[in-house]
Image (spheres, rainbow, N blue to C red):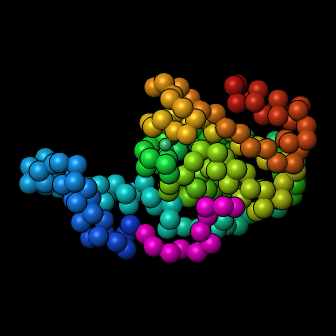
């Protein structure tokens, strides 16, 4: 899983003063007057915002699922419209949207709120949408050993990312499939039709 830390290293909370200092330097370097009233608190505000939007570095996404439950249910489980907010690692610009997760259990299920926590752990850091999609699929695949996992991410990017100029409002859709969803077009179609419903 490229890009994932295996351990907790550093975080905004550990480095508040330094981040504030460097934000102030950037303001000066772009030609701003950092004594202007509107900017006086900006370095501190940016740092507090970073604490929130980069909170993912405080946790290992592989740990957030925690306990899984034995359950005989072996039919498709879908949690859709999980809202996410992330930062593109190429421009440090926001991208955000919705994540839909489906899996077919094979004896193990996970609490539904844990899926939302997994989304936060994976997205609240510098990311690319493609990696968010595959990391969520891989972590669920590893933790639950399900018959299949499918993840669909719909994101709007506030930057012009690597694939040329995107128009405002255009949506990037990525998907990842594991197990039965990869092998079986009918499984993918069932998932996608339930997303629309
Ligand atoms: Zn970008």
- Of residues 8 and 77, which is closer to you in this image? 8
Q: Is residue 22 visible?
A: yes
Question: Where is residue 3 drawn, in percent x and y?
Answer: 61, 61
Residue at 64% across, 45% down: 130
Indicate yes or no whether the magenta region holds residue 183. Answer: no
- Residue 187 higher or lower than 62, as above or below: above
Q: Main secondary structure of the magenta part?
A: loop
- Name the side, left or right, on which 51 lies relative to 45: right
Residue 113, can we see it?
no
Q: Is residue 179 left or right of residue 57?
A: right
- Residue 18 image offset from top left, x and y in percent: 29, 70
At horizontal 48% and vertical 24% (from top left) the residue drawn is 167
Residue 7 magenta-highlighted: yes
Q: Quadrant of residue 13?
A: bottom left
Q: Quadrant of residue 182?
A: top right
At 46% across and 61% down in the image, what residue appears?
Answer: 55
Q: Is residue 175 left or right of residue 8?
A: right
For image coordinates 87% across by 48% down, the residue present is 179
- Pinpoint residue 170: horizontal percent, then vertical percent: 53, 26
Magenta highlight range = 1-11
Seen from the viewer's position, the closer of residues 119 and 5 is 5
Residue 29 percent across, percent down from the top left: 22, 54
């Amino acid at each position: 899983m490229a890009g994932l830390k295996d351990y907790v290293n550093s975080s905004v909370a550990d480095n508040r003063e330094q981040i504030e200092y460097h934000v102030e330097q950037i303001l000066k370097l772009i030609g701003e007057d950092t004594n202007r009233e509107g900017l006086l608190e900006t370095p501190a505000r940016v740092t507090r915002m970073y604490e929130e939007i980069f909170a993912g570095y405080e946790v290992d996404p592989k740990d957030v699922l925690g306990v899984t439950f034995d359950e005989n249910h072996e039919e498709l489980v879908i949690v859709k419209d999980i809202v996410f907010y992330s930062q593109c690692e190429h421009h440090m610009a926001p991208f955000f949207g919705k994540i839909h997760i489906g899996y077919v259990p094979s004896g193990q299920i996970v609490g539904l709120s844990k899926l939302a926590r997994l989304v936060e752990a994976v997205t609240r850091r510098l990311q690319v949408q493609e990696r968010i999609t595959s990391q969520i699929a891989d972590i669920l695949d590893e933790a639950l050993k399900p018959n299949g996992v499918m993840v669909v991410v719909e994101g709007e990017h506030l930057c012009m990312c690597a694939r040329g100029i995107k128009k405002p409002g255009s949506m990037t859709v990525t998907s990842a499939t594991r197990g039965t969803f990869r092998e079986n077009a009918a499984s993918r179609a069932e998932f996608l039709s339930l997303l629309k419903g």
